[in-house]
Amino acid sequence: LREATEEDKPSISRISLLTSDGGASAEHSLTIKELSSLVWALPYISLPTGFGYVLVRRIDDREGSGKEEVLGYIVATSDTLKFREAADTIFEPPLREKYPLELMGSPELMALDKFFIDRIHHPIAYPKHILDFSPAHFHIAILPELQRKGWGRKMIAKVAERLQSIDPTMHGIWNGIDPKNGPSIIFYAKIGGKYYNSGED
Protein backbone atom coordinates (compact mmCIF):
# COMPACT_ATOMS: atom_id res chain seq x y z
CA LEU A 1 0.00 0.00 0.00
CA ARG A 2 1.24 3.46 -0.83
CA GLU A 3 -0.22 6.95 -1.11
CA ALA A 4 -2.10 7.61 -4.35
CA THR A 5 -0.69 10.20 -6.75
CA GLU A 6 -1.84 12.03 -9.87
CA GLU A 7 -0.03 9.39 -11.95
CA ASP A 8 -2.32 6.70 -10.52
CA LYS A 9 -5.49 8.29 -11.89
CA PRO A 10 -5.70 6.17 -15.10
CA SER A 11 -5.36 2.96 -13.08
CA ILE A 12 -7.88 4.17 -10.51
CA SER A 13 -10.33 5.00 -13.29
CA ARG A 14 -9.94 1.54 -14.77
CA ILE A 15 -10.48 -0.20 -11.43
CA SER A 16 -13.51 1.97 -10.75
CA LEU A 17 -15.00 0.94 -14.10
CA LEU A 18 -14.34 -2.74 -13.39
CA THR A 19 -16.09 -2.62 -9.99
CA SER A 20 -18.84 0.02 -10.31
CA ASP A 21 -21.93 -1.99 -11.17
CA GLY A 22 -22.93 -3.39 -7.81
CA GLY A 23 -19.36 -4.55 -7.29
CA ALA A 24 -19.14 -6.05 -10.78
CA SER A 25 -17.70 -4.61 -13.98
CA ALA A 26 -19.53 -1.67 -15.55
CA GLU A 27 -17.79 -2.12 -18.91
CA HIS A 28 -21.03 -3.10 -20.59
CA SER A 29 -23.33 -0.79 -18.63
CA LEU A 30 -21.45 2.50 -19.10
CA THR A 31 -21.06 4.20 -22.45
CA ILE A 32 -18.84 6.94 -20.94
CA LYS A 33 -16.24 4.84 -19.18
CA GLU A 34 -14.77 7.55 -16.95
CA LEU A 35 -17.99 8.54 -15.22
CA SER A 36 -17.82 6.25 -12.21
CA SER A 37 -14.32 7.37 -11.26
CA LEU A 38 -15.25 11.03 -11.70
CA VAL A 39 -17.90 10.60 -9.00
CA TRP A 40 -16.48 7.95 -6.69
CA ALA A 41 -12.70 8.22 -6.86
CA LEU A 42 -10.79 10.96 -8.65
CA PRO A 43 -12.07 13.99 -6.68
CA TYR A 44 -10.42 12.59 -3.56
CA ILE A 45 -7.03 12.51 -5.30
CA SER A 46 -7.52 15.90 -6.98
CA LEU A 47 -8.76 17.98 -4.07
CA PRO A 48 -6.88 19.02 -0.91
CA THR A 49 -9.83 17.86 1.18
CA GLY A 50 -9.26 14.22 0.22
CA PHE A 51 -6.56 11.57 0.15
CA GLY A 52 -6.08 8.02 -0.98
CA TYR A 53 -3.94 4.90 -1.14
CA VAL A 54 -3.35 2.35 -3.86
CA LEU A 55 -2.69 -1.35 -3.58
CA VAL A 56 0.18 -2.19 -5.93
CA ARG A 57 2.04 -5.23 -7.15
CA ARG A 58 5.70 -4.75 -7.94
CA ILE A 59 6.64 -5.99 -11.41
CA ASP A 60 10.16 -7.40 -11.52
CA ASP A 61 11.96 -6.97 -14.82
CA ARG A 62 15.51 -7.31 -16.03
CA GLU A 63 16.01 -3.57 -16.13
CA GLY A 64 14.97 -3.22 -12.48
CA SER A 65 12.63 -0.40 -13.42
CA GLY A 66 10.46 -0.86 -10.34
CA LYS A 67 7.24 -0.83 -12.35
CA GLU A 68 3.97 -1.30 -10.49
CA GLU A 69 0.53 -2.63 -11.28
CA VAL A 70 -2.31 -0.95 -9.37
CA LEU A 71 -4.86 -3.53 -8.23
CA GLY A 72 -7.01 -1.55 -5.81
CA TYR A 73 -7.56 1.81 -4.22
CA ILE A 74 -9.15 3.47 -1.24
CA VAL A 75 -9.97 7.18 -1.17
CA ALA A 76 -11.30 9.17 1.76
CA THR A 77 -11.89 12.51 3.40
CA SER A 78 -11.74 13.51 7.03
CA ASP A 79 -14.45 16.14 6.52
CA THR A 80 -17.32 15.22 4.23
CA LEU A 81 -18.90 18.68 4.17
CA LYS A 82 -15.62 20.45 3.31
CA PHE A 83 -14.93 17.83 0.66
CA ARG A 84 -18.39 18.31 -0.84
CA GLU A 85 -17.93 22.09 -0.93
CA ALA A 86 -14.58 21.71 -2.71
CA ALA A 87 -16.00 19.23 -5.19
CA ASP A 88 -18.96 21.49 -5.89
CA THR A 89 -16.86 24.59 -6.50
CA ILE A 90 -13.63 23.21 -7.99
CA PHE A 91 -13.92 19.69 -9.38
CA GLU A 92 -17.46 19.42 -10.70
CA PRO A 93 -18.10 22.71 -12.60
CA PRO A 94 -16.01 21.61 -15.63
CA LEU A 95 -17.74 18.22 -15.56
CA ARG A 96 -21.16 19.87 -15.60
CA GLU A 97 -20.15 21.64 -18.79
CA LYS A 98 -18.65 18.50 -20.32
CA TYR A 99 -21.66 16.36 -19.37
CA PRO A 100 -24.72 18.66 -19.39
CA LEU A 101 -28.09 17.46 -18.14
CA GLU A 102 -29.33 17.48 -21.72
CA LEU A 103 -27.42 14.23 -22.18
CA MET A 104 -29.96 12.55 -19.93
CA GLY A 105 -32.26 12.35 -22.94
CA SER A 106 -29.67 10.75 -25.20
CA PRO A 107 -30.68 7.28 -26.45
CA GLU A 108 -26.97 6.45 -26.76
CA LEU A 109 -26.45 6.55 -23.01
CA MET A 110 -27.38 3.78 -20.61
CA ALA A 111 -29.05 4.00 -17.23
CA LEU A 112 -25.74 3.95 -15.34
CA ASP A 113 -24.35 6.80 -17.47
CA LYS A 114 -27.41 8.86 -16.58
CA PHE A 115 -27.10 7.97 -12.90
CA PHE A 116 -23.57 9.38 -12.75
CA ILE A 117 -24.37 12.47 -14.84
CA ASP A 118 -27.28 13.22 -12.53
CA ARG A 119 -25.00 12.73 -9.51
CA ILE A 120 -22.50 15.23 -10.96
CA HIS A 121 -25.27 17.82 -11.21
CA HIS A 122 -27.18 16.80 -8.09
CA PRO A 123 -24.76 15.50 -5.44
CA ILE A 124 -26.16 13.25 -2.77
CA ALA A 125 -27.47 14.90 0.39
CA TYR A 126 -25.79 13.21 3.34
CA PRO A 127 -28.20 12.35 6.18
CA LYS A 128 -27.51 14.34 9.34
CA HIS A 129 -27.34 11.30 11.60
CA ILE A 130 -24.57 9.82 9.42
CA LEU A 131 -22.55 13.03 9.58
CA ASP A 132 -23.18 13.12 13.32
CA PHE A 133 -21.73 9.63 13.54
CA SER A 134 -18.58 10.69 11.69
CA PRO A 135 -17.48 13.48 9.36
CA ALA A 136 -15.21 11.03 7.53
CA HIS A 137 -16.13 8.70 4.68
CA PHE A 138 -14.35 6.55 2.10
CA HIS A 139 -14.70 4.60 -1.15
CA ILE A 140 -12.79 1.39 -1.82
CA ALA A 141 -12.38 -0.87 -4.85
CA ILE A 142 -10.21 -3.95 -5.33
CA LEU A 143 -9.92 -6.07 -8.46
CA PRO A 144 -11.43 -9.56 -8.07
CA GLU A 145 -8.08 -11.35 -8.04
CA LEU A 146 -7.16 -9.72 -4.72
CA GLN A 147 -10.57 -9.74 -3.09
CA ARG A 148 -11.14 -11.98 -0.05
CA LYS A 149 -7.42 -11.96 0.77
CA GLY A 150 -7.49 -9.52 3.69
CA TRP A 151 -6.54 -6.44 1.70
CA GLY A 152 -9.82 -4.63 2.20
CA ARG A 153 -9.40 -4.78 5.97
CA LYS A 154 -5.78 -3.57 5.70
CA MET A 155 -6.73 -0.68 3.41
CA ILE A 156 -9.49 0.51 5.73
CA ALA A 157 -7.09 0.24 8.68
CA LYS A 158 -4.60 2.41 6.77
CA VAL A 159 -7.25 5.09 6.29
CA ALA A 160 -8.32 4.83 9.94
CA GLU A 161 -4.70 5.37 10.98
CA ARG A 162 -4.49 8.47 8.77
CA LEU A 163 -7.74 9.83 10.19
CA GLN A 164 -6.49 9.33 13.74
CA SER A 165 -3.40 11.36 12.88
CA ILE A 166 -5.65 14.16 11.57
CA ASP A 167 -8.06 14.05 14.51
CA PRO A 168 -7.34 11.74 17.46
CA THR A 169 -10.98 12.04 18.58
CA MET A 170 -12.28 10.52 15.33
CA HIS A 171 -14.19 7.39 16.33
CA GLY A 172 -15.64 6.07 13.08
CA ILE A 173 -15.89 6.24 9.32
CA TRP A 174 -18.64 5.36 6.84
CA ASN A 175 -19.17 4.71 3.14
CA GLY A 176 -22.00 4.17 0.71
CA ILE A 177 -22.78 0.68 -0.58
CA ASP A 178 -24.89 -0.33 -3.56
CA PRO A 179 -27.67 -2.53 -2.12
CA LYS A 180 -26.96 -4.94 -5.00
CA ASN A 181 -23.42 -5.46 -3.71
CA GLY A 182 -24.14 -8.32 -1.33
CA PRO A 183 -20.49 -9.38 -0.84
CA SER A 184 -19.59 -5.87 0.37
CA ILE A 185 -22.44 -5.84 2.88
CA ILE A 186 -21.25 -9.20 4.21
CA PHE A 187 -17.63 -7.98 4.34
CA TYR A 188 -18.46 -4.90 6.39
CA ALA A 189 -20.56 -6.95 8.79
CA LYS A 190 -17.56 -9.25 9.34
CA ILE A 191 -15.29 -6.34 10.30
CA GLY A 192 -17.83 -4.82 12.67
CA GLY A 193 -19.64 -2.42 10.38
CA LYS A 194 -23.36 -1.71 10.52
CA TYR A 195 -25.57 -1.47 7.44
CA TYR A 196 -28.12 1.31 7.20
CA ASN A 197 -30.56 1.53 4.29
CA SER A 198 -31.00 5.25 3.63
CA GLY A 199 -33.58 4.72 0.91
CA GLU A 200 -31.34 6.58 -1.58
CA ASP A 201 -30.65 5.12 -5.04
Image (cartoon, helix red, strand yellow):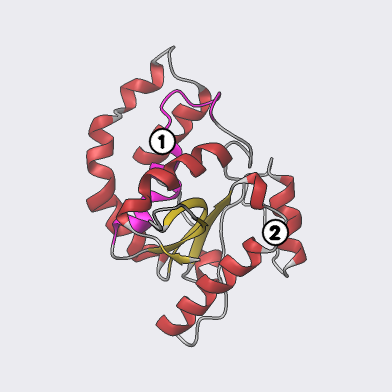
CA gap, disc 1 and disc 2: 26 Å
Residue 60, relative to residue 159: is it above or below?
A: above
Residue carrying label 2: 195
At 65% from the left edge and 66% from the top edge, which residue is drawn? Answer: 153
At 43% from the left edge and 30% from the top edge, which residue is drawn? Answer: 33
Near-viewer residue (137 or 121): 137
Residue 108, relative to residue 9: is it above or below?
A: above
Whether residue 55 sits left or right of residue 91 in the image: it is: right
Near-viewer residue (81 or 35): 35
Residue 149, relative to residue 136: is it above or below?
A: above
At 63% from the left edge and 61% from the top edge, which residue is drawn? Answer: 152
Question: In the image, what residue type sits under mark 2?
Answer: Tyr
- In which quadrant is the C terminus drawn? top right
Near-viewer residue (100 or 155): 155
Q: For the residue carrying disc 1, how many other residues have a C-alpha within 10 Å: few (<14), some (14-19), or many (20+)? A: many
Span highlighted in magenta in the image: 27-47
Residue most extreme to the top: 107
Residue 18 horizontal/vertical position (percent): 55, 38
Q: For the residue carrying disc 2, how many other residues have a C-alpha within 10 Å: few (<14), some (14-19), or many (20+)? A: some
Residue carrying label 1: 35
